Amino acid sequence: MKKRRKTDYYTPCFKLITIITLLILSAVPSAFAGEDGAVLQAGELLPAPVMIHPSPDSVVIVNDGRLLEFLWEPVSKAEYYRFSLYAVSNPNFPVYEQEFASDWRVLVRVDQFADGQYYWTVQAVKPENVAGVRQGGDLSRRNFTLRNLQRLTLTSPASGAVVPGLVALRGETEFRWDSSEEVEKSRFVLSRNHDPGLQPEIEIMNPGRMIRVDRLGEGVWYWTVEAWTREGFSISATAPRQLIVQPTSLLPPPENMRPANGHRIDAAELRLNGSITFSWSAVEGANSYVFSIFEETSSGRRQVIRLDPYTPTSFTLSDLSLLDYGKTYIWQVEAVNRNRQGRIERHGQQGENSFVLDIRSPGRVLPGETGRLYGN
């Protein structure tokens, strides 16, 4: 009997394996379908997407919160796209990437990135084949320059600054702002509303970098500057600033007021003088006085007379027909300070005394001859 070699035992096995392998290979298709039904030949690379925006080597200007659109033309037979954004100074690590972009554009908030040179890439990817493999196509790349617009700066007054009331009234309050950008148009707004743009009390279009406002009243004010570049981008201040104008301190009440409080004017005094003279001492810091007379009634005080601010420290009431017999009256004097235009810049505390016409006869005092009383 002929002795068989060891390799003779494996020959049938090799034949069987070869047959099975050929059968499998014959069953595996050499092509697969894309998402649109188009047939891709095995090993066929997808073309590089045609980039649209940003344009090559363009300067992209952005401001706070703006999304930059990266746009390209769709690639036939692509299932999705790989998008990456790099700083030219660091090409090893993308500043932003999107591995599965199903659309033909990507929106990126680029105001978080520093100014400088950038480039972006996009690659179309084939659908998965029967072997579970996805194949990327040719890569598109494009450079651009990024420039973030700088918002303008409100320089002074600082937010929460406090201005004495008299200083704000007598002088001009200065507001300053600045910008490193080229400003096409701007607007200064001053308001008592925390959102100045809603209810502006003072509005100045295209102001200079310094704005002066005179006679600013007491209270809380809010101010800001809105501005736009030639391209229409807003570079307005981030938030308005608050300014507090303190109340102006009141001048003290006049002293040495005559007639004294509670003085009773009888018929003999009226016959002797034919009028009533009111006087007081000058108040330091005042240059005018406001004189008033009120009648005390059961329902409150009724104004009888009120004089505009004037400089003397006395007043003589000659028209006694304004007064009634037996009535109680209150006379007041307020010291004030007026500017050159006659506007009151500083008010004062009221000084007041009372007096009574101590005459029994009813009715009003009859004007005319000295000492003659109505009804007598």
Image (tube, grey):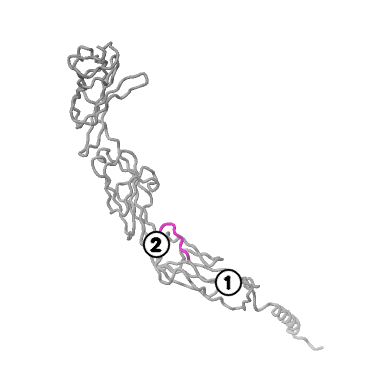
Badge 1 crowding class, 10 Å Cα cut-off, few under 14, some 14 to 19, many 20 or more, is many
Magenta region: which residues?
63-69
The residue that label 2 is drawn on is 114
Q: Which mark is residue 194?
A: none
For this rendering, which residue is in front, 374 or 52? 374
Task: State the residue in front, 296 or 319.
Answer: 319
Element type where label 2 sits in the image: loop
Relative to 289, say whether 45 is above or below. Answer: below
Q: Left or right: 203 with respect to 27? A: left
The answer to which image quadrant residue 271 occupies is top left
Identify the residue shown where x is 64% and y is 75%: 32
Query: Of callouts 1 and 2, which one flags the residue occurring earlier in the amino acid sequence?
Result: 1
List x then y, in percent, for residue 319. 23, 22
- Return the x and y of residue 116 as percentages of the image width and height: 38, 66
- Asked if residue 64 is positioned above or below residue 38 in the image, the reply reads above
Label 1 vs label 2, nearer the camera:
1
Where residue 375 appears, x then y in whole percent? 26, 13
| Label at residue 78 | 1
